[in-house]
Image (cartoon, grey):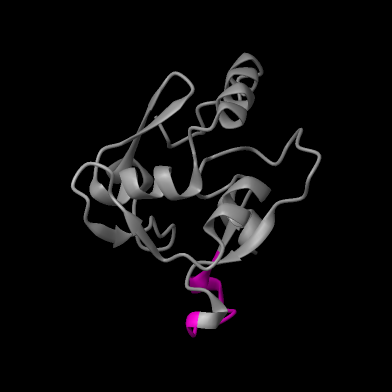
């Protein structure tokens, strides 16, 4: 159900599960250690990179305002409200977007190399994330 709803894409960075060696994780948006339940409304599909970097984080520092803000929540937030693409880089257009990019290292060299390759295969940018 989670994979189907996500279209087999990481709900944080948009990476397609197709062509990836590692199986994506089912992430608790609100971590279990913070009382998050294992219910559809609290689960998101996450690539290994995003899942490991997010861990139990629910908020992070916005590098522009220095405020602590909530991370992007794929069940409550609209991706296009917080992010845009510039080629292979994600641009945060809100405090939440910027903080999420920073916390999950969404513009790491590895992410950008994969996105460049995915663009050649016409799998980037993800549908609905333009």
Q: Position of residue 53 (x, y in %)?
A: 56, 53
Q: Farthest residue toward the top?
A: 120
Residue at 34% x, 49% y is 99
80 and 12: which is toward the camera: 12
Quadrant of res 89? top left
Residue 33 vs 86, above or below: the answer is below
Check residue 35 for magenta coloring.
yes
Q: Is residue 44 left or right of residue 8?
A: left
Quadrant of res 115? top right
Q: Position of residue 39 (x, y in %)?
A: 56, 78
Q: Farthest residue toward the left?
A: 65
* Residue 94 shows up from this direction: yes
* Residue 36 shows up from this direction: no
Residue at 28% x, 60% y is 69
Q: Position of residue 63 (x, y in %)?
A: 28, 44
Query: If the image is split into quadrants, where does the N terminus sit?
Result: bottom right
Q: Position of residue 122 (x, y in %)?
A: 60, 20
Q: Is residue 115 left or right of residue 61?
A: right
Tell me the magenta residue range.
Answer: 34-43
Residue at 63% x, 46% y is 49
Check residue 5 for magenta coloring.
no
Quadrant of res 2? bottom right
Residue at 52% x, 74% y is 31
The mark tally for this picture is 0
Q: Farthest residue toward the bottom?
A: 35
Residue 59 vs 126, above or below: the answer is below
Residue 72 vs 119, above or below: the answer is below
Q: Is residue 21 left or right of residue 33?
A: right
Q: Farthest residue toward the front?
A: 66
Query: If the image is split into quadrants, where does the C terminus sit?
Result: top left
């Amino acid at each position: 159900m989670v994979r189907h709803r996500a279209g087999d894409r990481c709900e944080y960075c948009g990476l397609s599960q197709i062509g990836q060696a590692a199986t994506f994780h089912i992430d608790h948006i609100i971590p279990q250690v913070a009382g998050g339940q294992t219910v559809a409304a609290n689960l998101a599909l996450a690539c290994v990179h995003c899942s490991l970097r997010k861990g139990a984080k629910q908020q992070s520092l916005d590098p522009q305002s220095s405020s602590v803000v909530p991370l992007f929540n794929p069940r409550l937030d609209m991706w296009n409200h917080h992010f845009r693409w510039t080629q292979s880089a994600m641009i945060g257009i809100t405090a939440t977007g910027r903080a999420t990019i920073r916390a999950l290292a969404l513009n790491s060299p590895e992410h950008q190399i994969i996105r460049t390759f995915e663009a050649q295969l016409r799998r980037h940018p993800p549908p609905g994330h333009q």
